[in-house]
Image: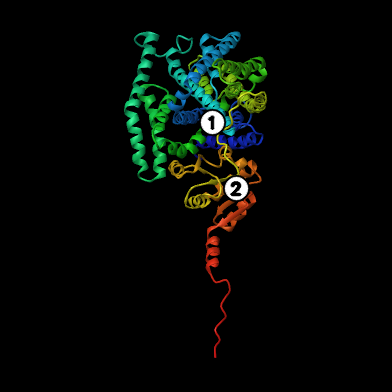
Amino acid sequence: MHHTSLIATICAGLVLAFVFGALANRFKLPVLVGYLVAGVIVGPFTPGYVADQELAPQLAEIGVILLMFGVGLHFSVKDLMAVRKIAIPGAVVQILAATVMGMGLSHLLGWTLGAGIVFGLALSVASTVVLLRALQERRLIETDRGRIAVGWLIVEDLAMVLALVLLPALSGILGGEAPPPGPGGVLGAFAMTIGKVGAFVALMLIVGRRVIPWILHRIAHTGSRELFRLAVLAIALGVAFGSAALFGVSFALGAFFAGMIMAESELSQQAANETLPLRDAFAVLFFVSIGMLFNWSVVLREPLAVLATLAIIVIGKSVAAYLIVLFFKRPQSVALTISASLAQIGEFSFILAGLGVSLKLLPKEGQDLILAGAILSILINPLLFAILDKALVKVAARGGRVEPPAGTVAQPHGVLVGYGRVGKAVAEGLKGRMPLVVIEDEGDRAQELRAAGFEVIQGNAVRPEVLLQAGLAEATHLFVAVPSPFEAARIIEQAKAANPKAKIIARAYTDADVDLLTQMGATHALIGEQEIARGMLALAPRKAAPAPSVH
């Protein structure tokens, strides 16, 4: 039998991640918690099957590359500049405050200064996945509160990218593993690192900014989605690997710049959509591999240290962010939203912790505390947002200014999913009959819709937050015109949960499709051939003419 540890590790990771992710979703928790628990189950600190301890980190590294590529794809200098006066100083001060608190706890635990810095930095940065999901569910992304939170997060991410670059060069002076000896000692190594990073950044900004969009446009003109998807992945992985091999910088930084350069192309949205499934799959394996590193016994061995770590993340960071926002004379609703958004840690925390351990800066116990703090803070975060929702009601009742969620649509209105041949005909036919919001995933079609005067939500309607952003909760009708009956069934299921009273009219191909869609909650499921037959019959004579008599 062939050696199958790679297959076993991937299968066990994805299957258990699905099981525990589904359970987490069932209990209204972030699915990320389920992925981490799956990793704990297949890790060395629990009985039973143990996944390959050498392969898992390599799979996680691919996950890091694709995660950072995704961060770069969504990085927007324009959005950051719009909120720079509060996001930049606010994030910097909050990072410093959390780092100092982390250093204080590490001092009490008897760790070195370098360990305290890594520990504090890991506790200072919020999870992109958790924060964006929470904002999307409440339709806050396009509000002033949401833009500040996202801008704040971008600054945090940039600070962590800088930390990933500088820590290896400064490791020796901070008490960790020193870089290989070279001319100039530590200062020489530091200068060399800065020089390599500078050369890489210059190459990407001068050459990459021209070459990468050119390649994407050339491939897009071939009309092959498969080749376009492959080109995006090749650029992401190729730049990440090349940056590490040629310039000695991290995979993470290379992938981030690849995504950032690609974000300037008009094809960036299509690139993000095409690579999302693979990015999600490897992100799952990344979180599973992180869970494998977690020694859950730290909760029993060091309960006070775990509670102190959690307090820094949930209370210390939140209070610091709240006070910073109020200092900038922003409304209390903004301060509460930012503080709740940042009261958790995630991807960058794991990456920093892993780097700290590899450089012998951070003790293994520190990594365990960071993982415990991440899991617990992610579990608590939905509760904090539930408290936030109630607090904002009280703020509004006292006469305070609370910005409403984005995407509120006049009612009654209809929601159309899909703007292909069928969807386009439906949209044109509904003009003047009812206000219509169209959900469309393809960037080109979304632009065509906006040019035609329709209100458009760009995204995948399978995601509940996209349906809510389209105002489905207030809609009277939902028209599902997507060609895939499986995708249509998932959309209908989400729609029924969001608005049980809406009439749902869906497109089907077979009688089996009709049964599936009506079972999921569609009011009507229409088959094209039957509608053509009805049209033909409608044009036929109403009553047959009498047969001619034969004499």
Residue at (36, 37) in percent of width and height: 216
Which image quadrant is residue 137 in? top right
Residue topped by disc 1: 141
Which image quadrant is residue 11 in? top right
Residue topped by disc 2: 477
Tell me the SS state at disc 2.
Answer: strand
> Gap in Å between the C-alphas at discs 1 and 2?
25 Å
Position above or below: 452 against 286: below
List x then y, in percent, for residue 283: 51, 32
Give the amino acid at mark 2. His
Tell me the SS state at disc 1.
Answer: loop
Q: Earlier in the sequence, mark 1 or mark 2?
A: 1
Neighbourhood count class around disc 2 (C-alpha, 10 Å): few under 14, some 14–19, many 20 upward: many
- Nearer the viewer's eye, disc 1 or disc 2? 2
Neighbourhood count class around disc 1 (C-alpha, 10 Å): few under 14, some 14–19, many 20 upward: many
Indicate which disc residue 190 carries. Answer: none
Residue at (50, 19) in percent of width and height: 86
Give the amino acid at mark 1. Ile
**Residue 420 is at least partly visible in this image:** yes
Which image quadrant is residue 126 in? top right
